[in-house]
């Protein structure tokens, strides 16, 4: 029974991981990001170069997790569908 439960949990985790991976979009799909989300991003970061993004659900809230570069730094921002930035993080300077 213990092995069965472990197998079911592992299978569930794999399905969740595969689902998240399949939702990751690259920069060529930025036209699918809603205008309000892009407006919210550009209000704080006027010239983002988007590398990849995902749409995620946290409870009943949809968030767009966007990874991008601007002026030599990498950033990540979580933005609600109404354009409100919930969280942003400066990762590191790009060396080149």
Image (tube, rainbow, N blue to C red):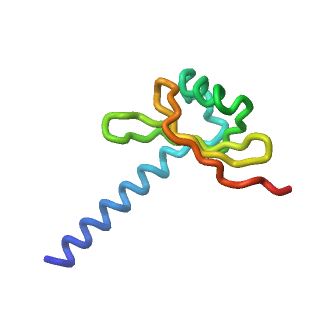
Image position, residue 33 (x, y; %): 56, 29
In the displayed structure image, the side of residue 95 where residue 43 appears, left or right: left
At a point 57% along the width and 43% down the height, the residue shown is: 88
Q: In which quarter of the image is residue 76?
A: top right
Image position, residue 71 (x, y; %): 79, 41
Q: Is 22 placed above or below 81 here? A: below
Quadrant in the picture for the C terminus: bottom right
Q: Which residue is situated farthest in the right direction here? A: 96
At a point 66% along the width and 28% down the height, the residue shown is: 42
In the displayed structure image, the side of residue 49 where residue 33 appears, left or right: left
Residue 82 appearing in the image = yes
- 15 or 90, which lies in front? 90
Quadrant in the picture for the N terminus: bottom left
- 18 or 36, which lies in front? 36
Q: Is 91 placed above or below 81 here? A: below
Q: Quadrant of residue 47?
A: top right
At a point 71% along the width and 29% down the height, the residue shown is: 46
At a point 58% along the width and 26% down the height, the residue shown is: 40
In the displayed structure image, the side of residue 27 where residue 62 appears, left or right: left
Q: Is 90 placed above or below 43 here? A: below
Residue 53 appearing in the image = no
Q: Is 23 placed above or below 4 here? A: above
């Amino acid at each position: 029974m213990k092995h069965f439960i472990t197998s079911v949990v592992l299978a569930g985790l794999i399905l969740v991981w595969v689902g998240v991976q399949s939702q990751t979009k690259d920069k060529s799909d930025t036209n699918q990001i809603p205008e309000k989300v892009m407006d919210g991003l550009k209000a704080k970061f006027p010239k983002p170069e988007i590398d990849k993004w995902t749409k995620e659900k946290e409870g009943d809230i949809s968030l767009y997790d966007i990874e991008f570069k601007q002026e030599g730094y990498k950033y990540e921002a979580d933005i609600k569908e109404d354009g409100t930035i919930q969280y942003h993080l400066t990762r590191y300077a790009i060396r080149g």
